[in-house]
Image (tube, rainbow, N blue to C red):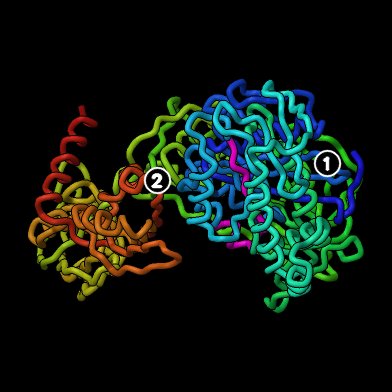
Amino acid sequence: MRVFESDSIRNICIIGHGAAGKTSLTSAILFDSGAVNRLGRVEDGNTVTDWEDEEIERKISISCALAHCEWNKKKINILDTPGYRPFLAETRLSVRAADAAVVVVDAVAGVEVQTEKVWEFCDEYSLPRMIVINKADRDNASSERTLASLEEEFGRGVVPLEIPMGMEKEFTGVISLLTGRAYRYERDGSGKFQEMDVPAQYEDELAERREKLIEMVAEGSDALMERFFAEGTLNQAEILEGLRIGVKQGDIRPVFYSSATLNIGIPQILDAVTELFPSPAVVGTTTGTDPKTGESIERKISNEEPYAAYVFKTIADPFAGRISLIKLYSGIIRSDTVYNNQTKEKNEKLGPLQILQGKTMTPIEEVHAGDFFAVTKLRETTTGDTLCDPAQPILFSSVELPEPSITFAIEPKSRGDEDKISHAMSRIIEEDGAIRYTRDPQTKQLLLAGSDQLHVEVTVSKLRKRYGVEVLLKTPRIPYRETIRGKADVQGRHKKQTGGHGQFGDCWIRMEPLPRGGNFEFVDEIFGGAIPRNFIPAVEKGILEAAERGYLAGNPVVDFKVTLYDGSFHPVDSSEMAFKIAGRIAFKKAMEMARPVLLEPVMDVEIYAPQEYAGALTGDLSSRRGRLQGMDIKHDVQIIKAQVPMAEMVTYSPVLTSMTGGRGSYSMQFSHYDEVPAQIAQKIIEESSKDKKEEEE
C-alpha cells in the first residue's frame, strides 16, 4: 500500500438518517474508484462496510466502518456511519475524526429526524459538508420538495451544483453547473456514462442556477466580489476557488444527486470530494490540551511536527483481538515501534500498521500526518486515547457519549455463566462505549443499559454469536428501600433451652428516624455491665442483618437510628449468636411500631424534543408522577427538566420515541429517595409477598 502525503488525503464521514443509502453510496464509491471489483448491495449482505453478522442480518449499519479509495490521485478515507438513533454514538465518533462530511438525504423523505441530529454533530466540530440527494430513482422522489426541506432546515447555504436529468424511473443522470455538461448513465449498475451537451429542455434552468451559484460564490470573498462586479461573472477557476473557500468556511453546502443502487452520479460526487473538501494540510492545525498546564495548544498537521495521534474507534474482534482505529494528526508513525500513550501515561509497542477496507487489513510500513490507520492487540490503549511524543505532549479531547436511556436485567440461560458474561461484556464495551454493564448490589441483578431497546438487543445478540453466551432480558427490579417515620422502644429477647448449654440474649433498644440520606446510626448507652462489652457488636450486627432483609417488601431499611440502652445476660447461656438473634427480634418489633414506609428512587430527567411536543410531554410526565423543575429552549430544542420516580421511567424510551416520531431524546441520573404513595406501596408490598411465596414453593 503506498503512502500518501497530507495534501493528497481527504478524510470524509458519510452520515444521514437511517436507510438514506449511506452504505450503498460507500459501496458505489468503492466500486467506481476501482477499490473493489463488484458493486456490493445491502440486500445481498455483501457490502464492504456492513460486515458484522448483525448488520447483514438486520440490513442496517450498527458500527462505523473504515474504507478507502483513490480518485484523481488522491486518497479518500471513508467512514461509513449508522443513521438510526440507537447507534448515533458511533456516528459522533466518526464525525470527531473526519475533516468533512457527506450528508446523505433520501429524495423521497427529505430532511428526517436523524438528518438534523448528525448535522448538529457537524456543527459541533465545524465540519465542511456537502449534501447528496440519494434514491433519485425511487417512486415519489422529488428534487424540488427535497431541496425545499434542505433550505428550510439548513438555510441559504444549501446550493445545488447539479440538475437531475429526470426523477423517479426517469432519472438517468446529472447536469453539472460547474462544467456545463450532462452525464447520462446506464441503469444497469455498471456506472458507465456518456458525457454530452446539455439537452435543450435544461438550458434555461442551467443558466438560471449557474447565475445564482456565481452570485453565492462571489459573496464569500472580497476579491471575487470585486471581480464579479467588474466582469459580471466569474471564470471556472474563480468559481472553484470561491467554492473551496465557501465550503471550508461552512457558508456553502453543495448539493449533488445520485442513485447509489443504480450507480448513477457517483464520479461527480468523487470529483467534488477531491476538489472542494480540504485536505489535512489545508485544515492546517488541530487543537489539544497541554497535559501539564491544562491550557489549549495547537499542533500543525505536518510530517515535520512531533507525532500526535488520536484513537477514535476500537473494534473487538473475537479472532484478531482489539483493533484500534487511529487518526495521525502530526508526524510520521512506523510499524513495530514503541510510542507513548499520553492518556494512560504508558508506552505501547505498535506492531504492523494496517489500512482497513471494511474488515480486510492491508499492512503498511509507515503513515504520514493526516492519514488513518489501524493497529491490533494494543494492551493499554482504548478509544479516546492520545498517542504523542512525550517531549512535546498534547491531549486530544475525547467524545462524550450519551448516558444510556434504557436498562434491562439479564440472566444467563446456563448456570455459572456469569463470569463468561463479564468477560464478554468487557470486550463489547471496549468497542461500544454507549453500553453499560453493572451489578446492582441491592437487587443482585446483572444490568445491561443502552440507548434503546434495539441497542440492547444487538448487544445480547453479540454475546450469543461472538462469545457463545445466551442470556434472557427482563425488566429490572426497582431498588426500593424502606424507612420509618415514627419512634419505637422495644425489647428483643431470645431464650432457648435444649439440654446442656442454652441460648440467652436480651436487649432493649430505641429506634427513631434519621434525615433522608442518614443511612444508619448505632448508639451504645449500656452502663453498669447490663450487657457485656463483647456482646454489644453482636446486637448491632443482628439489627443490620435484619435491616438488609427489610420488613415491608424485602428491601433494605435505611435512615434510622438505634440506641441500645439496657438488657440482661446469662453467665453460661449468653453468646454472640444469642445476642445477634435478640437484635433481629428487637428490630422486627420496632419496625411494627415505628410506622414503616417504602422509599423509591427518584431521577433527575432531562428531555430534549422539538417545541411542538412540549405540552404532550409535560402532560405525560405528570401522569408518571413527575414534578416539573423547569423548561428551557436551546437551538430550537425544548428542554424539559423534571424529577420522576425510576419505576415510571423504566418503559419511557419507546413511549418518547412514539410521542415525538423519534425526534425526542432524554437523559436521567439518580437524584434522591422519596416515599412511595400509600396506594402504590401497598401493591408493591403485595407483589413482593406473592413473589416470596412462589420462591418458597
Question: Looking at the picture, does residue 465 appear above or below residue 501?
Answer: above
- Rendered image: mark on residue 633: none
Residue at which label 1 appears:
71
- Mark 1 to mark 2: distance in Å? 37 Å
Please, what secondary structure does the residue beneath circle 1 have?
A: strand
Dividing the picture into quadrants, the one containing residue 268 is top right
Q: Position of residue 685 (x, y in %)?
A: 15, 45
Q: As drawn, is 483 to the left or to the right of 388?
A: left
Q: If you read the primary sequence from the N terminus, does the residue marked by circle 1 or circle 2 appear first?
A: 1
Write the residue at 44% across / 42% down.
448
Q: Quadrant of residue 134?
A: top right
Relative to 420, 212 lies left or right = right
The front one of 480 and 353 is: 353
Say which of 54 and 689 sits in front.
54
Disc 1 crowd rating (10 Å Cα; few below 14, some 14-19, many 20+) is some
SS of the residue under disc 2: loop
Q: Give the amino acid type for the residue marked by disc 1 in the picture.
A: Trp
Q: Which residue is mark 2?
A: 662
Highlighted magenta segment, given as a residue range: 120-134
Taking the spot 46% from the left edge, 45% from the top edge, the residue there is: 450
Residue 667 coordinates in the image, percent (x, y): 40, 56
Which label sits in the foreground, 1 or 2?
A: 1
Say few, some or many: other residues with alpha carbon within 10 Å of mark 2 (under 14 / 14 to 19 / 20 or more). some
Where 229 sits versus 353, above or below?
below
What residue appears at the point 68 percent right and 32 percent down from the top-left corner?
264
- Magenta span has 523? no
Q: Position of residue 38 (x, y in %)?
A: 75, 23
Residue 429 visible in this rendered orientation of the protein: no
Q: Is residue 690 left or right of residue 59?
A: left
In the displayed orientation, state which residue is furthest to the left. Answer: 593
